[in-house]
């Protein structure tokens, strides 16, 4: 049986960041990915936003790792030539009743260490984005966008330069302790490792349930989000976010590096899922009506017929409707099993936090 120092299960942006850190620390590292290419799950189906850290409860892993990850990510993109841009974003109150919520959001951001937010009056916001409708806004200069695929390729390149390896089409069906190491069942073969990181995204709880001796496994609550793209030129140069809503950050406007505008994600709870065949990534035309209504609350000039279906993703939540959950980075201190870390509920801001999550994993092993 072949043995390595460390195995990371899952080659999304977080798994690749973790594997890179392990390899750069001197461990012989192997990444196992069930799909035919890297990042085919959550990592390729999101808004590609570098978050500033406004939304998360002070003291949470999401708050701390978002701020740390944001700085690491910008530095990594600069040093590796990964496409990105600090676009800035406006969080908008579209009616006067939302203004206290905007103030509360600014207070939470300050408690998290976000010190560059700028409150804007309605005239100040419209001076920046004339097509906008709002009563007030917060300007976040530290928010940006990133080429996620380019980022993953850069992480993979660093991994390989540190003598790490990637194995595609290599799904893991179970783990167990044997002779002081972990034994993984992988495509009819067995592989030994001193350390294992479960970075399987949507499938992390499923795999944890097939890990011998592991308890305290969260239930996966999958939440689908659809995106629509804008036909024609966007009148906005910054990202536009409404006030946060249950299940997500609302139907916001983001831009890609080419300036194309897209809107989403909305919120569609899929329930407790365990079957890959149940995943439906289609964007259904019937959801467009809700998008027009949500978008016109802050952009009343959106023309009818200007939206076209783009793509959809599924959030790997570990909480249901009306409940929020922090990232879970479960190491030996939580489950008592040496050499194992499980990553649960790594939804937004997981992309922003990926390099900081990698740091945290190394501390947890």
Image: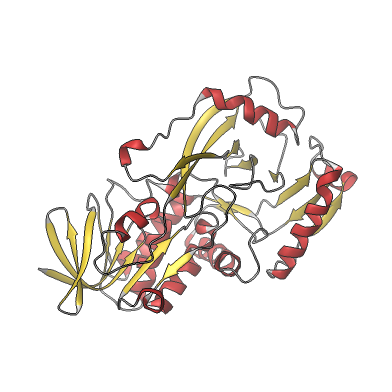
Q: Position of residue 38 (x, y in %)?
A: 34, 51
Q: Nearer the viewer, residue 337 or 184?
A: 337
- Residue 328 left/right relative to 35: right
Q: Position of residue 122 (x, y in %)?
A: 88, 45
- Residue 100 left/right relative to 236: right
Residue displayed at 71% across by 42% down = 237
- Residue 30 left/right relative to 327: left
Residue displayed at 34% across by 78% down = 336
Residue displayed at 65% across by 41% down = 252
- Residue 130 left/right relative to 42: right
Quarter-wise, where is residue 140 in the image? Answer: bottom right
Q: Nearer the viewer, residue 302 or 208?
A: 208
Q: Quarter of the image containing the N terminus? A: bottom left
When the figure is inspected, residue 321 is found, relative to residue 163, above or below; the finding is above
Q: Position of residue 238 (x, y in %)?
A: 70, 45
Q: How is the image coloured?
A: secondary structure
Quarter-wise, where is residue 342 in the image? Answer: bottom left
Q: Is residue 190 visible?
A: yes
Q: Is residue 127 visible?
A: no
Q: Position of residue 135 (x, y in %)?
A: 85, 43
Q: Nearer the viewer, residue 84 or 119?
A: 119
Residue displayed at 51% across by 45% down = 46
When the figure is inspected, residue 93 is found, relative to residue 235, above or below; the finding is below
């Amino acid at each position: 049986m072949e043995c390595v120092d460390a195995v990371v299960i899952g080659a999304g942006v977080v798994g690749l960041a973790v594997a890179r850190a392990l390899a750069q620390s001197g461990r012989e590292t192997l990444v196992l990915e069930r799909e035919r290419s890297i990042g085919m799950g959550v990592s390729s189906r999101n808004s590609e936003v570098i978050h500033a850290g406004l939304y998360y409860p002070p003291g949470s892993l999401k708050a701390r790792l978002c701020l740390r990850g944001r700085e690491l990510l910008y530095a990594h993109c600069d040093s590796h030539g990964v496409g990105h841009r600090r676009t800035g974003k406006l969080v908008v109150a579209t009616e006067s009743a939302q203004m206290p919520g905007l103030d509360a959001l600014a207070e939470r951001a300050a408690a998290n260490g976000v010190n560059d937010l700028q409150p804007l009056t309605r005239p100040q916001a419209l001076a920046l984005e004339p097509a906008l409708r709002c009563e007030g806004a917060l300007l976040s200069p530290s928010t940006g966008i990133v080429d996620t695929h380019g980022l993953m390729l850069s992480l993979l390149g660093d991994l390989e330069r540190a003598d790490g390896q990637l194995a595609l089409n290599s799904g893991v069906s179970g783990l167990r302790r044997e002779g002081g190491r972990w034994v993984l069942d992988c495509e009819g073969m067995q592989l030994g490792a001193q350390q294992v990181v479960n970075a399987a995204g949507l499938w992390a709880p499923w795999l944890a349930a097939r890990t011998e001796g592991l308890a305290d496994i969260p239930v996966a609550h999958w939440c689908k989000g659809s995106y629509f793209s804008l036909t024609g030129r966007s009148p906005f140069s910054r990202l536009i976010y409404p006030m946060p809503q249950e299940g997500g950050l609302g139907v916001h406007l983001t831009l890609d590096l080419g300036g194309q505008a897209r809107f989403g994600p909305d919120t569609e709870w899929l329930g407790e899922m365990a079957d890959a065949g149940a995943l439906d990534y289609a964007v259904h035309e019937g959801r467009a009506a809700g998008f027009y209504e949500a978008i016109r609350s802050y952009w009343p000039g959106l023309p009818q017929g200007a939206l076209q279906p783009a793509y959809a993703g599924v959030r790997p939540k570990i909480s249901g409707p009306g409940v929020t959950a922090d990232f879970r980075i479960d190491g030996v201190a939580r489950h008592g099993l040496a050499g194992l870390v499980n990553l649960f509920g790594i939804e937004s801001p997981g992309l922003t936090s990926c390099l900081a999550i990698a740091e945290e994993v190394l501390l947890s092993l």
